[in-house]
Image (spheres, helix red, strand yellow):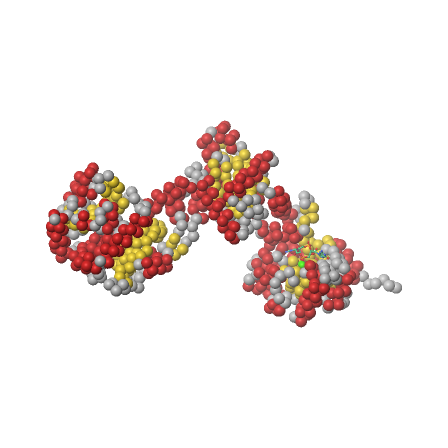
Amino acid sequence: MRDDKINAMTRRRKARTTKAPARAGRAAFPAKSGDWAYRLVEAVPSLICLCHKGLVTYLNETGCRWFGLKSAKMAIGRPFAEFMHKDDRRAVAARMNGRAVPGEPFPVRLARGKSKIFHAEMTLTRFNRADRGALLVQAFDTTGQRKSDAAQENARDKLQRRLSSEAMARRRVEDDLSLAAQVISNLGEGVIILDQRRRVRSVNPAFTRITGFTAKDVVGRLAPFEHAREKGKAVARKKANRKAASKTASHIANKEGGEAKLGPTIWATTERDGRWEGEYWNKTKNGDDYAERLSLSTVIDDRGRILQYAAVISDITKRKEDEERILYQANYDTLTKLPNRSLFLDRLNRALATAARARSKVGLMFIDLDGFKLVNDTLGHDIGDLLLRETSERLGHCVRVSDTVARLGGDEFTVLMPNLDDPSHAPLVAQRILDSLSKAFHLNGHESFVSASIGITVFPEDATDANELLKNADSAMYRAKELGKGNYQFFTEELNRELTERLTIKNGLAKAISGRELSLYYQPKLDLKGGAITGVEALMRWNSKELGVVSPARFIPVLEESGLMVEVGAWAIETACRQQRAWQNAGLPPVRVAVNLSTRQLRDPSFVAVVERALEESGIGPDGLEIEITENLLMSEAGTAIATLRKLHDRGIHVTLDDFGTGYSSLSHLRRYPIDTIKIDGSFVSDIATNPDDAEIIHTIINMGKTLNRTVVAEGVESAAQTSLLREYGCDEIQGYYLCKPLPAAALTEFLRERTRPPKAGQ
Ligand code: C2E
Ligand code: CA
Ligand code: CA
């Protein structure tokens, strides 16, 4: 009874206040667009309440939910102070009566019934100057920041039902429209109204406060949230770390999270469901990052047609940062800023799942410092902490960006290497770590030395689940300790052997290059018709003091991998050209020298220049040089490599396609490439005398090669039987042990002399 009377009174008063609206509030919003403004105020996620002389005249849906009221009616006419915690009532009343500074927030406790209290941040705004008794109250929940989605969903449904009740809506429109518009212009939340074409029509002052964009900046354009990107946790973490400014930590931050433009998702959902709600990181006009919560909904007319869109945004940066900080503390080691065991296991599990799907490998390294206890016991824990921190910094510098370094506790660290394409990468990293940690540590004036023992496991070879893999890495680490510390061990013997050998080769190669342990051998080719030696092929040899003679098949891939191939390849071309010149000078008949090329060389932009220089310095013509490329190289290379090849070919240098038959190219395909000679792979030759299939293949290749006007050479020819078959099929040239093994330059000079010596009289 009493409620109804006050209700009627306040409605009359409200009607009066509408006649003298705050001008700024009106100007910012279109006046005739149904009840959207009212809906918007209802739907914002903060409490909105209008009071007149301390009594509630309006309470939005969120407010009702907070106070546990079934409808706003139950609040209207009651003193607002009743909803405050009893200890805060006087303070709030004083503010309501005094001149509250618009928008200045203060903390307050709200009461729900008798028992429940929750914390909020409140702002009071005297938004209508014409009526000094009218007050806008807004409150943001600071306790239940993460309300359950179910509760929100429920409230939304209720709201939807209420709004669809036509009578309700219509009655409200007249009364509340301009009032609602005023409320909106005073809202703490940013409001964007968009037209049917999704262009901004108007914004409220809070929007400008949050984003820095004024109405002039955005009206007629796409809303700023169109450009928001989903950033994983990267931005937040970067911010959290700004203070710590640890290199390792920001290094980690950069690795997280991909980015995807949110605009399309937001609109797709809004068109389908009528609304979108979510959180993301965006940029202000100044370019600063801030976290935003957006609630976008359609405004439809009676017939369900979209009239416009209403977006409510709030700045949730502080909350996000708090969340991130908590998350950070749960996942990172405070001393070193490295991921802790929990995050590490999480990443390991994820890496294993991805690798299992992609059938790729994952490497895991277990690192234990040798001699840490001594430092800790003799120099104290503070120095020990410094050592651990410095260790984590050094570890960070030894790994790739995609790897994770973590601290499991004490002086135990791990390195996770997802997408380990090649297990031989692991010992390289391990060695780098050993080298890095063996350098002196300068800790507050103390010089200390430690080393590390490292155990390495590889998924899926050594284990298929995370715990097993970690356990095996741990036991491999123990073996490293047993073997005298300061070394690394693989869990499996086989890998241990294979990869150690590869590393020995790698370590030795640098010395081989500087110590002149590399040389070229030469293997001649014979013209089957005229019986002349038409050319020789240069084949690299490494005569290692430690490893003996190492096959190029073993060390060329290592050269490629370590980036030394370009340099060594250039050396081979220069040496081969000089040798060609030496044979010319010795008066021998012209023999062209063929040099094998690797992918890296052909991709190198200065490759043509390297060849030109070799020709010039040795003084031989382009006809004296030939390059051999493999079929696979040709097929896998893009335009630039082919263009380089064409340049050399145009220059008069012979090009041979090596190992033909092992790849997938068809002969007719070859018509397009600058190739003079096809060299049939030795694997086809070895069985031609015994296997009719191989014989037929070779026969076909020879015939087609001739049709294409290419010279055909067979390599790996080891017997007279093979030679006569090849001659019968019309093969042009042969190469192989049958004629001559690859020989050092001096021995080959002798061979050439033998061949060209005129037959003795009487023979
Ligand atoms: P490739 O170009 O196919 O060379 C032919 C290989 O077969 C050589 O092995 C040669 O010694 C061997 N060979 C020759 N005649 C016979 C024979 O009758 N029977 C048998 N079973 N083998 C024969 P090598 O010298 O060990 O070279 C292996 C591979 O290393 C070469 O295969 C080539 O791809 C690569 N290579 C050698 N030198 C260089 C170089 O300077 N640069 C580049 N990029 N690769 C090189
Ligand atoms: Ca070759
Ligand atoms: Ca070959």
Side of 498 where 225 appears, left or right:
left
Q: Nearer the viewer, residue 242 or 163?
A: 163
Asked if residue 97 is positioned above or below residue 21 in the image, the reply reads above
Determine if residue 464 is in view: yes
| Rendering quadrant holding ligand 2 | bottom right
Residue 5's x, y, as percent?
11, 50
Q: Residue furthest bottom?
A: 707
Q: Residue furthest top?
A: 378
Quadrant of the drawing holding the C terminus? bottom right
Which quadrant holds residue 643?
bottom right
Residue 495's x, y, as percent?
61, 45
Residue 252's x, y, as percent?
45, 45
Residue sitting at x 75%, y 62%: 689
Which quadrant holds residue 434?
top right
Side of 163 where 430 appears, left or right:
right
Determine if residue 400 is in view: no
Side of 751 where 420 appears, left or right:
left
Asked if residue 761 is positioned above or below residue 54 in the image, the reply reads below
Asked if residue 588 is positioned above or below residue 52 in the image, the reply reads below
Q: Nearer the viewer, residue 406 or 437?
A: 406
Residue sitting at x 46%, y 37%: 389
Residue sitting at x 17%, y 39%: 90
Q: Nearer the viewer, residue 143 or 20?
A: 143
Residue 236's x, y, as percent?
38, 47
Residue sitting at x 21%, y 53%: 183
